[in-house]
Amino acid sequence: MSETPPSAPPVPEPPPFVPKPLPLALAYIGASLFIGVSQSLGQGFLAANIPTLAGELGATQSQTSWLIVAFMAPRASLPLMLIKIRAQYGLRRFAEVSIALYAAVALLSLLTVDLRSALAVELLSGISAAPLSTLAILYALEPLPQRLKMRLGLPCALTFMSLGMPLARALSPGILTDGSWTSILLLKLGMSMVCLFLVFRLPLPHGDRVRVIRGLDLISFGLIAAAFGGLVSCFTTGYIYWWTAAPWIGPVLALSIAGVVAALVIELHRKAPLLDVRWLTTPEILHLSAALLVFRIILSEQTAGAPGLFQALGYAPEQIAPLFWVISLATVAGGAACALVMKIERVPAIHVVALLLIAVGSALEAHANSDVSPAQRMLSQGMVGFAAALFLPSAMAAGLVKAFSKGPQYLLSFVIVFLSSQILGGTIGAGLYRTFVAARTTAHAQWIDAQLQVGDPLVAGRLAEIRAQLSSSVSDPGQLQIQAVARLASDVTREATVSAYNDVSALVSTLAFCALAALLGHVARDWLRVRMAGPGAAPE
């Protein structure tokens, strides 16, 4: 397949930098931080309060989990088109229309009455929130000179964009004091109105408008959007319905992969592609993309692991909240540290430190017992949160430099890869971790049950201990025995659950150490090549 235009349209050069007064520059940075945390809080509140939503909507938690699918599916694919839309219709118009749509959807969400209307609203919320990631980055870069855009602007924007998930779990218990989801919706509406004010009060430049959207862009985007939607659906709900029990999961996965392949085939035969597939499949970009995807999957343990463990152990949200305050503070500290040390030549060293923190932090969690509490995870989870904020800005900065070195037209392809790998990788990672936990919990429970054979003296001794503990409140011998057996079964489930999450932590630690070894090997190879080639050579 081919297109009429003989070549890609020219990409305009950025206008010369005009310094802004310090108060105005700080206002733009503040707008970036507020917009960034606003868009990520929406996803965080939704993921943290599925049980509350299920109760309000009169649905099961399995049915309510489709709200996450509705929100995340458009966010995984929309980066494909947003940058071209911004280029074709102008930066300021893009910002104003995007934020107006976001505020309108926040207002519409107050009309939600049942699961069907909630699904429609969350789909619109995902669509309207997708441009806010771009706006957060643009507002962070706008007031800064070129030398500070990557060093200061990017870490600030990405840190607050990733802050929403832990911050939502920290804030939720205090907001849901009456148990009503309306409190969350009103907060989101208020924040959207502040964002609306900031965008119109602190306008971005108009920018040049270039006709970049082609007919085949819509076909490729449609295929990839459907494929990403299928992947998000499978990895969000696969562990709930179980992969081999739900007959629809296999065909959806196959069709999703086929959709991606079809879109890539179309793009390979275009003269002005939506995605430069040939550049994206070069060894250098494949290495960077794989690193981003693996790191995102590793970090998914923080959103799928710690909350799942303590919820399964019966901890209330207000008991878990202090842990997520620590993670939030560690995330901000990591972003600040990244801004202080960020230089392109230091990126490999930054990544080494980040991977080491994740590996050690996860290893600290791999030997917990059934009495584990949120306070015991503050150090390890804080290390992981700090590492995430350290890694992502430096990785994106390195990718942007590679894209600009090839030409401004490659920027679109890299930004798509970065945003999609983070959103899709996070969804896939969380689904895989939850599946792994479910499988390992069953395996550990079966192993423990096999050890607790009837007549085993250890079992009899444990039952006697439980009966002694319950004897003060239960006088009937038959009822006492029933409750003792039920308590023993509960203990078995608790032990199996903790052992399964220990396995997850060990897996994450192993993956991080393997990634660290691969990174060190890559750095050593580049160093040897430079040393053997002579003083004038540069690493690949």
Image (cartoon, helix red, strand yellow):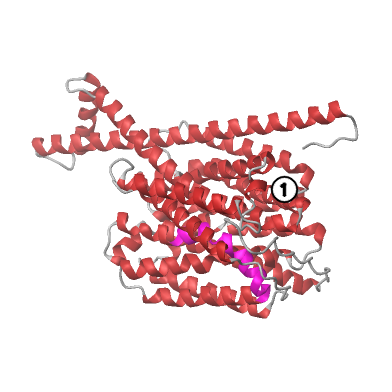
Q: Residue at x 36, y 58 (%)?
A: 66
Question: In the image, is 454 to the left or to the right of 166?
Answer: left
Q: Main structural element of the magenta stretch: helix, strand or loop? A: helix
Quadrant, the N terminus: bottom right
Question: In the image, is 207 to the left or to the right of 287?
Answer: right
Q: Residue at x 54, y 31 (%)?
A: 510
Where residue 196 sits: x, y (%)? Answer: 58, 77
The residue at which mark 1 appears reads as 398
- Residue 82 lies in the magenta-colored region: yes
- Residue 79 lies in the magenta-colored region: yes
Asked if one can make out residue 327 in the rendered structure from this viewpoint, the answer is no
Position above or below: 91 against 361: below
Where residue 275 sits: x, y (%)? Answer: 62, 54
Residue type, numbered disc 1: Ala
Position above or below: 128 against 301: below
Which residues are drawn in magenta?
Answer: 71-92
Of the pair 144 and 359, the residue shown nearer to us: 144
Where residue 88 sits: x, y (%)? Answer: 65, 71
